[in-house]
Image (tube, rainbow, N blue to C red):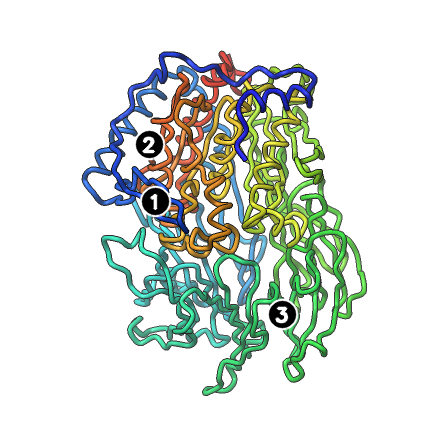
Amino acid sequence: MQLRHATLVAMLAAAFGAAPALAQSCSPSGPSLTYPVSKKVGQTDNYHGTTVADPYRWLEDANSAETKEWVDAQNKVTQDYLAQIPQRAAIRQRLTQLWNYERYSVPGKEGGRYFYTRNDGLQNQSVLYTLKNLGDTPRVLLDPNKLSSDGTVALAGIEVSPDGKLLAYSTAASGSDWNEIRVRDIESGKDLADHVKWVKFSETAWTKDGKGFFYSRYDEPKEATKLADVNYFQKLYFHRIGTPQSADTLVYDRADQKEWGFRSQSSEDGRYLLITTTKGTAPKNRVSYKDLSKPDAKVVDLIDNFDGGYDFIDNVGSVFYFSTDRNAPKKRIIAIDITRPQESNWKEIVAESPDTMTGADIINNQLVVGYLKDARSVVRVVSLDGKPVREIALPGIGTVGGLQGERGDSETFYSFTSYTTPTTIYRLNLKTGQSTVFRQPKVAFNPADYETRQQFYTSRDGTKVPMFIVSKKGLKMDGSNPTYLYGYGGFNISLTPGFSPANLAWMEMGGVYVVANLRGGGEYGEAWHQAGTKLQKQNVFDDFIGAAEWLVANKVTSPQKLAIGGGSNGGLLVGAAMTQRPDLFAAALPAVGVMDMLRFHKFTIGWAWTSDYGSSENPDEFKALVKYSPLHNLKAGTCYPATMVTTADHDDRVVPAHSFKYAAAAQAAQAGSAPILIRIETKAGHGAGKPTSKQIEEVADKWGFLSRELHMGDAGKTVGGAQ
């Protein structure tokens, strides 16, 4: 139900004791900027008897000369506007200083070698290193910065053969989801002739003898439309080293199931290939296996329905260990003997707990299990028969990654990060439970100057929702703090504490950084996720708006000082929030967002999101979608917050047409003087693999934009404390 503006003010007055000031007032003269002409066409569609106009449909054709002219004109308006912000140069300079620190990945070990990536600070892409002993000097194995002149070719994945002799590595160009796999001889550092293309959403699984690997791909697309065409009928192949891709063997496909996707994983003992079948992005999957010790073995369906999520951990002989949310929304660990696979024979090893299980592996012949407790990491060690061994002492409240290895290893590595702790790599002795620092970066700031607190607030329907509030110490609760509220709320993805030089710069400017752990995410298990999907998706927006209302009511900030941001599904979140409550925010930064909720399933992998969103082809789901679809809820004559939409020309996850159409419609609808801009990056995609230089430029533009729209004065000039 859409409420009139006066009704909203009255409701807020009752809640807060007084009507809040609006984020901005409507200017009778309308927008202060002259935007490029966005022509309207007479396109309409009939959805179950409801006619819906789509006047900017022509912007879906990214290859047309007309769309390219529009993109160039919009970018010029945006860059001209940003160029007038005096703080932007100082912000960019400080971001460059903060970004210039060493960053490491968690090491992995294979075939007696260690492998990890390192970025010296301002390298566009992190470099892959290897060493045999931890005290040795690391050797560069692969430097992605040498794969392109501008750093836009990124390393998308690596997998080392079990004998440690060969590296299968995937690359992605200009941020595209399309990957290519090549093979490098680790000793010589030279590539072999092997070259595998048209790979997307795939794992690489080596055979035990290192003679080949399994991977998933789609049929070769048309070159002109490869960034927009829908992706169906994924297939699982085996590539034998030294042979052309045309000779690869088809291992598994389902011609009767166009939406099924396949991930492959080799068991540590090399005997089994595990095949996980997914349908869209729903966290439910089938599990099949192939006995690789038998040349002509058929693929056997172990779990042949989508009744839950099953993540293979490892096997001990014929006993397979899985973490699953089957009959356990926060997950448990079970053992299935494939010689007696009936569910009645399954054995529970680790029961569901009040905390949400995030992952597990068998290392040192024990289960190392990660959990989230109110969106913060906890790590526990359990014996293979389920008996508690110990809880690993962590450096503080934050997020842990890594904790992988082989069954016989006595060590593993993990990363630890928080909002004020740069990602540090630890080596964990599993025999003693003791952690020691392996790599610790130095960043030019004092963590003691900042504080993080977790606040629970009540959403519209009474649900308790947590959020993290991070700022300089001594925050004054007088409603004057520029505040950036960030959220996601979808696809079972959890937002947990993590260090970011971008967010540190924001706080140095005097800003408050807030992360809301909305329903739709995975923080509290599958029930929390489902509560923010399909017909319940409005819960996500209510949670986000509830966080904003709490921040205003408790004088952390005010509507004139409050900005919201999010990317991808989080871009949808921002678009929905600013159309539902334009009075509550001064600025909005929707990035690579899903803005057209009636047509998202018609592009690339968009069909896979119907598990979270539903589909306009379903009458009941259409009614829910059209009520919140950002594109369809912009209303002419409304004062919208200052908005800078961001997208990229090579985004083949959420095609840029979403952002194009939304920006055009928002510019036409805007009644106030606040700008509605769109920033369209070139040679970039959805976000993964984006070069450091492009990241810094984009963040400088975002913080520069907010410094102006939130009236932060000289914040940019004094960022980092330097006059």
- Mark 1 and mark 3 lie on one chain; the one further toward the N terminus is 1
Q: Residue at 45% of width from left, 17% of height from top?
A: 708
Can you tell which of label 2 and label 1 is closer to the viewer? 2
Q: Which residue is mark 2?
A: 664
- The circle drawn on residue 16 is none
**Residue designated by label 1:** 152
Q: Quadrant location of residue 687?
A: top left
Residue at x 64% of width, y 24% of height: 11
Q: Amino acid at mark 1?
A: Thr
In depth, the one of 308 and 483 nearer the eye is: 308
Which residue carries the number 3 mark?
Answer: 314
How many marks on residues? Answer: 3
Q: From where the camera sits, is residue 227 visible?
A: yes
Badge 2 vs badge 1, beta-carbon distance below 8 Å: no
Q: Earlier in the sequence, mark 2 or mark 3?
A: 3
Q: Is residue 337 above or below residue 354?
A: below
Residue 537 horizontal/vertical position (percent): 56, 45
Whether tag 1 and tag 3 are in contact, CB under 8 A, the answer is no
Badge 3 local density, few (<14 within 10 Å), some, or many (20+)?
A: many
